[in-house]
Image: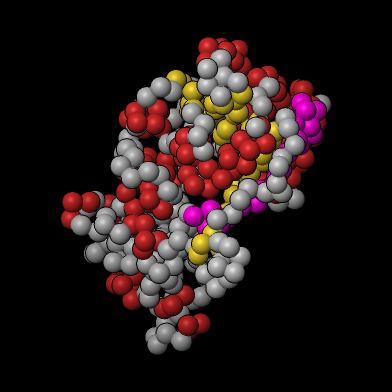
Amino acid sequence: MKKIVSISLFSGAGGLDISSHMAGIPVILSTDFDHDCIETLKANKKYFGETKILEGDLHEIKSETLKKYVEEEKPNKFIVIGGAPCQPFSKAGYWVTNNVRKGINDPRANLVNEYLRVVTDLNPDGFVFENVESLMHPSNKVIVDKFIEIIEEAGYKYKIIRANALEYGVPQKRKRLFILGSKNEFKSAEPKKTHGRPECAEKEGLLPYVNVGDVILGYEGPEYFEEYEVTKGGTYHDDLCEVPQGMNYKALTAWAGYPNPKFVADKRFWNFLLKLSPNQPSWTICAQPGPWVGPFHWDNRRLRVPEIAAIQTFPKGYKFCGSRRSIQKQIGNAVPCLMGKAMIEFVKESLD
């Protein structure tokens, strides 16, 4: 008999699944439709050796199938975790025109509906839902409003948390939205933050933000070399070399006082030629970066797989399957493990 377990939806490379393990909640079932992600989960037997790994589109996975796995485990309590892909939010209109139950079951509706379908059908003791911060934008907020309406009707207390990964020990500026649910009252106002700005962290009883140089040290050796990392000979390699650590292309503009400016400030994406400083946290790791979109290493190269994995706080030695492009997408789409851990621990605390 296990005290508390979790079911993971939209598992991807396993970021939130690892978060659950870190929080002391074993994952009994992980699901995803992407084959490379499934292979990644299977490759990490240390964490998923006893986890049922189910490949398939959640639209086509019946609630009864998921419920069966929970019943076989006979846990005291269980939670559902996951972050529905955000691309389908253009379908938000379905939420407005349908009543609540039809809104969940409408076959045209997006994957947020499928997450809610699983929660309302399985009736877990709690849940963790993750998504992009822009879900709170006025154009998308109808989704959050209906989400809350549905979970309240199902008997859940909830917290909406707008979080920055920096505040939970992740060496990366990454803002995300979490909706946390529990059948019980929460015991505190929000998940416990562990890190803060260096100038005031100690005063607030926190650790200073983690700098990227502290977590990717040791991966600069030739044994970690990747063809993908090479920028030399590329269109903007020489310009990249001129960008100071911790800055982007704007360092080479008139705005920054650069002689003979090469670019015009604010005419390119802010992460164009964006270069890390070892003495600062990283910027957000992208799932599908363009050829000259950063963050780049301060050694004027693209980041290596173990480096981006470390920035996302995956455990050292975690394995990823698929092409280099696929691996970048898997890691970039993941919930930073330490960030997810704080959210899951907050829900777990309410279930005691």
225 left or right, relative to 86: left
User: Which image quadrant is residue 38 in?
Assistant: top left
Q: Position of residue 283 (x, y in %)?
A: 47, 60
The residue sitting at 40% across, 44% down in the picture is 314
The residue sitting at 45% across, 51% down in the picture is 286
Q: Position of residue 340 (x, y in %)?
A: 54, 43
Residue 158 painted magenta: yes
The quadrant of the rendering that contains the C terminus is top right
Name the one closer to the observer, 58 or 41.
41
115 left or right, relative to 104: left
Residue 297 painted magenta: no
The residue sitting at 34% across, 40% down in the picture is 318
Q: Position of residue 168 (x, y in %)?
A: 53, 53
Name the one closer to the observer, 312 or 285.
312
User: Which image quadrant is residue 206 in?
Assistant: bottom right
187 left or right, relative to 195: right
- Looking at the image, can residue 185 be seen? yes
Q: Is residue 273 above or below residue 306?
A: below
Q: Is residue 258 above or below residue 166?
A: below
Which contiguous range is marked in magenta?
A: 148-169
The residue sitting at 74% across, 45% down in the picture is 141
